[in-house]
């Protein structure tokens, strides 16, 4: 394998087996806030123990290693086809080594060839920039949390949700309420206001690239993000739906332009096993630094 493949293999290993520090700190803080002796506290303790074991043994944090989503920021002239081939090789090797579960099946036949490589797997998003370095970020998104994502078209009469931020708030909180304990909560929400049905969902997942402790540059959206978490954590759903104070660990909201006829609010849900990591690579493919 070349340097790029070696670096991508290490990126996959760390993403699968190590929770980012910002997420771990949010989990530890939530554990401290849960009432002592409750099922919620026990659930959070087990989650924290699982994180420590996965890191120590270099084994996947969750048995469902999820959809494999790469985000690549690269210079003009970067060979995207060569990178895609290298990423596929790294995914195959990571699967052989057990960092990824044999997790990708043919949607018609149900056949699993055991490689995690096929149409749409892995998914790679490229973005060009004017610096020579290559930045590769990886999100591993489990199926359980993917199943409780939701998309709303406003206005929504049932929710009394109009085409404004209050209407968006009602839609986002309804998605949390509908999810309940499914999706392996406590969860993190990635939200897109606007776009179309496809771009809205895709951009909502890009919000998972933000750190949980950052602030939205828009004061209105920053306030809404904090309000969603605070309100959701008063619903009593709690970890895994067992009740408690920790339903959400964070909410991140982005905005895309929309057509006048459409007003979509797209909500992606990430489980507590928030697997996100990134590297800065040299032009030869060597790891020069970690992004999280």
Image (tube, rainbow, N blue to C red):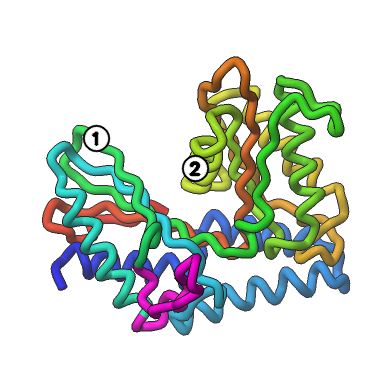
10 Å crowding of disc 1: few (<14), some (14-19), many (20+):
few
Q: Is residue 107 magenta?
A: yes
Is residue 215 visible to us here? Answer: no
State the residue at coordinates (68%, 29%): 223
Q: Position of residue 75 (x, y in %)?
A: 18, 40
Check disc 1 and report the residue beneath it.
129
Q: Is residue 115 magenta?
A: yes
Check disc 2 and report the residue beneath it.
202
Quarter of the figure that contains the C terminus: bottom left
Can you tell which of label 2 and label 1 is closer to the viewer? 2
Between residues 222 and 164, which one lies in front from this camera angle? 164
State the residue at coordinates (72%, 39%): 172
Q: Position of residue 142 (x, y in %)?
A: 56, 64
Quarter of the figure that contains the N terminus: bottom left
Q: Residue furthest front?
A: 108
Quadrant position of residue 88: bottom left
Q: Work out whether mark 2 precedes mark 1 in sequence or the reverse, and give the earlier one.
A: 1
Quadrant position of residue 24: bottom right
Is residue 154 visible to us here? Answer: yes
Between residues 268 and 33, which one lies in front from this camera angle? 268
Between residues 29 and 154, which one lies in front from this camera angle? 154
Q: Position of residue 257 (x, y in %)?
A: 51, 22
Question: The magenta stretch spans which residues?
Answer: 96-117
For mark 1, give the secondary structure.
strand
Between residues 238 and 264, which one lies in front from this camera angle? 264
Quadrant position of residue 122: bottom left
Q: Could you tell me what secondary structure mostly forms the magenta stretch?
A: loop
Q: Residue furthest top?
A: 260
For mark 2, give the secondary structure.
helix
State the residue at coordinates (29%, 48%): 135
């Amino acid at each position: 394998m070349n340097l790029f493949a070696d670096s991508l293999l290490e990126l996959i290993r760390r993403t699968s087996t190590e929770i980012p520090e910002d997420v771990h700190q949010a989990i530890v803080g939530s554990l401290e806030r849960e009432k002592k002796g409750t099922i919620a506290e026990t659930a959070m303790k087990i989650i924290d123990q699982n994180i420590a074991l996965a890191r120590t043994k270099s084994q996947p944090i969750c048995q469902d290693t999820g959809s494999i989503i790469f985000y690549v920021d690269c210079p003009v002239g970067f060979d995207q086809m060569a990178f895609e081939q290298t990423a596929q090789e790294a995914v195959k090797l990571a699967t052989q080594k057990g960092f990824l579960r044999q997790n990708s099946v043919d949607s018609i036949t149900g056949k699993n060839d055991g490689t995690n490589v096929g149409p749409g797997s892995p998914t790679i998003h490229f973005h060009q920039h004017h610096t020579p370095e290559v930045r590769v970020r990886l999100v591993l998104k489990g199926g359980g949390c993917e199943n409780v994502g939701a998309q709303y078209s406003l206005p929504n009469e049932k929710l009394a949700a109009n085409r404004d931020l209050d209407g968006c708030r009602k839609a986002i909180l309804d998605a949390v309420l509908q999810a309940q304990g499914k999706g392996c909560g406590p969860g993190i929400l990635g939200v897109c206001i606007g776009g179309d049905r496809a771009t809205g969902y895709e951009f909502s997942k890009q919000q998972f690239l933000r750190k949980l402790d950052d602030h939205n540059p828009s004061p209105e959206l920053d306030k809404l993000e904090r309000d969603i978490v605070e309100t959701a954590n008063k619903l009593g759903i709690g970890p895994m739906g067992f009740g408690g104070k920790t339903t959400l660990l964070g909410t991140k909201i982005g905005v895309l332009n929309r057509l006048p006829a459409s007003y979509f609010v797209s909500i992606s849900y990430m489980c507590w096993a928030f697997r996100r990591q990134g590297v800065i690579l040299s032009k030869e493919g060597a790891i020069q630094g970690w992004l999280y």
